[in-house]
């Protein structure tokens, strides 16, 4: 049971390079999320998706783009990497909640990204 | 403006004793609260949650208490075990059909023999 799988686990980029982080889930979850975690801070929401073909901005979306072409995959892109984007990136997914049936998010193990 | 606050960066507890982790929130629209546990180099793992219609939820050694008037919740671990040593994140969500979570900054719990 893989759950939420993030690829790659580690990556070092130079300033200005681009890359895509892949998140795949096998739980048939409708909702997917991208967070970043920085030292001394909690997880902050970058972008999220409430269904295939839909995306929306979170708390810290600048410098990132996302796509949800397939229900099971959620891609996070950095078009021109900056040192401020050095962080650990976590993907999560969940079933939609009902008002009386709230659902927790399930996380992958993260991608550690360093921008030099 | 930090909507979810964990004011204790770290906590050290002896094995077998109770661990109490605290969390405060400011947004009165939050109605669902979660605790996640995180080991190094792993993703957060869901531990326990509570809806605002309750004031207590229990799962084995873990109990979460919610005080809505004080906008405060706490996680009790009894008895504490060395394997409980991890970073614990409090998170909150309001009902808006997106299930977005707002996280606290985490508390590092160390359980020593």
Image: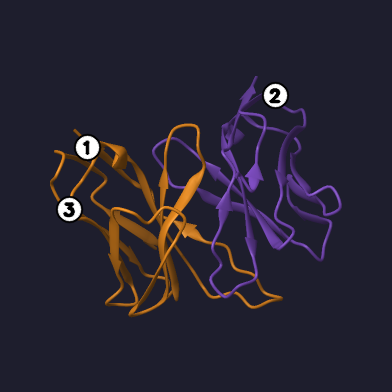
Chain colours: A orange, B purple
Task: List the residue tagged with mark 2.
Answer: B13
Image side of residue B56 versus residue B15, left or right:
right
Q: Quadrant of residue B111?
A: top right
Chain for disc number 3: A
Q: Looking at the picture, does residue B79 appear above or below residue B93?
A: above
The chain ID associated with circle 2 is B
Q: Can the viewer see residue A44 in this picture?
A: yes
Q: Residues within 10 Å of mark 3 (few under 14, many from 20)?
A: some
Determine which residue is flagged by label 3: A19
Q: How many marks?
A: 3
Question: In percent of the image, x 16 and y 39: which residue is there?
Answer: A15
The image position of residue B62, as x and y in percent, is 72, 46
**Image position of A100 with respect to B37: above or below:** below
- Residue bearing the label numbered 1: A115
Cα–Cα gap, marks 1 and 2 = 37 Å
- Residue at (28, 62) in percent of width and height: A65
Q: In this orientation, which residue lies closer to the viewer: B12 or A76?
A: A76
- Tell me: residue B113, above or below residue B66: above
Please state the horizontal and vertical placement of residue B15, each as a whole percent of the image. Answer: 70, 25
Residue under mark 1: which chain is it in?
Answer: A
In this rendering, position of residue A8 left or right of residue A58? left
3 vs 2, front mark? 3
Label 1 or label 2, whichever lies nearer to me, is 1
As measured in the structure, the alpha-carbon distance from the residue carrying label 1 to the one carrying label 3 is 11 Å
Of residues B85 and A22, the one drawn nearer to the viewer in this rendering: A22
Circle 2 — which element?
A: strand
């Amino acid at each position: 049971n893989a759950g939420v799988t993030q690829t790659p686990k580690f990556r070092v980029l130079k300033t200005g390079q681009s890359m895509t982080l892949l998140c795949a889930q096998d739980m048939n979850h409708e909702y997917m999320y991208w967070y970043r975690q920085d030292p001394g801070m909690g997880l902050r929401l970058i972008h999220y998706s409430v269904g295939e073909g839909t995306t929306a901005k979170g708390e810290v979306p600048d410098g990132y783009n996302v796509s949800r072409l397939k229900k099971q995959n959620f891609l996070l892109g950095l078009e021109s990497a900056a040192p401020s984007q050095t962080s650990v990136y976590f993907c999560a997914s969940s079933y939609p909640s009902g008002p009386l049936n709230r659902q927790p998010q399930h996380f992958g193990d993260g991608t550690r990204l360093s921008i030099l | 403006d930090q909507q979810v606050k964990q004011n204790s960066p770290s906590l050290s507890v002896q094995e077998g004793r109770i661990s109490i982790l605290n969390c405060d929130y400011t947004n009165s629209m939050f109605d669902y609260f979660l605790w996640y546990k995180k080991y190094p180099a792993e993703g957060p793992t869901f531990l326990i949650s509570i809806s605002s219609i309750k004031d207590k939820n229990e799962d084995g050694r873990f109990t979460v208490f919610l005080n809505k008037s004080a906008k405060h919740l706490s996680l009790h671990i009894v008895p504490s075990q060395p394997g409980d040593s991890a970073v614990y994140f409090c998170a909150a969500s309001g009902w808006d059909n997106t299930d977005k979570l707002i996280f606290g900054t985490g508390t590092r719990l160390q359980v020593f023999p």
